[in-house]
Amino acid sequence: MYNIDKDIRKSATLPTSFYKSQAQFEKSIESIFASSWLYIGDLSDVNSPGYVYPFTLLEKVVDESLVISCDKQGALRCLSNICTHRGKIIVEAAGKMPMLRCGYHGRCFRLDGSFKSTPGFENAVNFPTPADDLTEVSLKETMGLLFTSLAPKMSFQEVFQPILDRLSWLPLNDLVYDAASSKDYYIDAHWALYCDNYLEGFHIPFVHPALNAALEGDEYSYELYSYCNLQLGVAKEGELSFDIPEGAEDYGKNILAYYYWVFPNLMFNFYPWGLSLNVIQPLSQHKTKVTFRTYFYKDQKATGIQNQLDQTELEDEAVVESVQKGIQSRFYKSGRFSPSMEKGVHHFHRLIAAFMK
Ligand code: FES
Ligand SMILES: [Fe+2]
């Protein structure tokens, strides 16, 4: 239904109908979000035997009630949090518990989701069956971060391996969350407009003067993988950059940041001090929550991080909200891509077109 030419030199951007139609928004939730890998939380919050953690996957849009459970052996699972009796939500608050017990009529499930007991069913015939167990959905971990997918169209490894391979020299298993330098932003724009903006460094000289002063503009580059892409920011002389070990692919380069985008809604910005993870959560067709989560490499602590990130974020918000207004115009339907500077946006639009089929 959307046709994005694979040759960026000939291709036009997604039509505004994708961003403006309520029906297309709803379709994108099922076709894109329900079948991709979504960030759900940090391993360190849940990996304690007997701990269970309920959450709603993308509230009000995907809106699926799930629970992470850690069994007595420490194995983690992601389960449906809906009682198989009459459909009440089972676990309402996180905590340690020996089993999952529904507060409506007392049905109990083991921490692995299997049916355990239920009062009042002594005379039920052909009961229980596997349909009385809780449905288990996929749960994956990397870099201490947890991900789930309700119906994955691609393997977890396919999505993340390019990042893990490239950055294997970084202490990615020693990332420590820092609440003080993390923040939520609410933006009056479609979620994909926010991603479009992230996916190109074309606007940096125009929109981000401070960031532009730190980057070597001529050396900014784009690399595409199946479900993620990389923007490589090269630092000007004197700016903080990575100390890259010999043998690593980027040895000898003066890298300020690795900006990785993961389809559809995650941004992994690796800096010499740690990771800024951006989670883009659609709240409605024209409202988006952007969560900036800051993680420092163990024993690293940088100051002023929140201020720097905040400034760039506010500059981005302003242009994204302006585009949200702009695309309502009768006179704008679609535009063309810069073949050299908008490879990432083109990649994103190709993926949207493929998933919306
Ligand atoms: S709905 Fe859970 S026991 Fe009845
Ligand atoms: Fe930006």
Image (cartoon, rainbow, N blue to C red):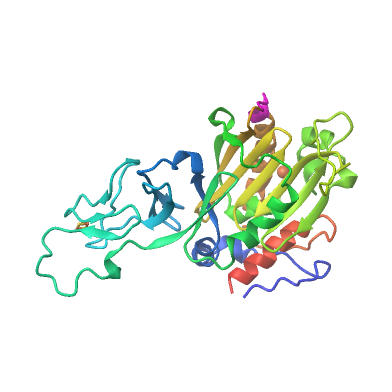
Residue segment shown in magenta:
300-307
Q: Is residue 310 above or below residue 287?
A: above
> Residue 124's x, y, as percent?
13, 70
Q: Is residue 325 visible?
A: no
Overall secondary structure of the magenta section: loop
Residue depicted at x 70% and y 32%: 273
Rendered location of residue 262, percent (x, y): 64, 54
Quadrant, the C terminus: bottom right
Name the quadrant where ligand 1 sits.
Answer: bottom left
Asked whether, in this view, residue 123 is left or right of residue 202, the answer is left
In the rendering, at what x and y percent does residue 238 appear? Answer: 87, 28
Residue 349 appears in the picture as rendered = yes
**302 falls in the magenta region:** yes
Q: What residue sits 10% from the left and 65% below the top? A: 122
* 280 horizontally vs 348: left or right: left
Image side of residue 38 versus residue 99, left or right: right
Residue drawn 66% across the image and 61% down it: 227
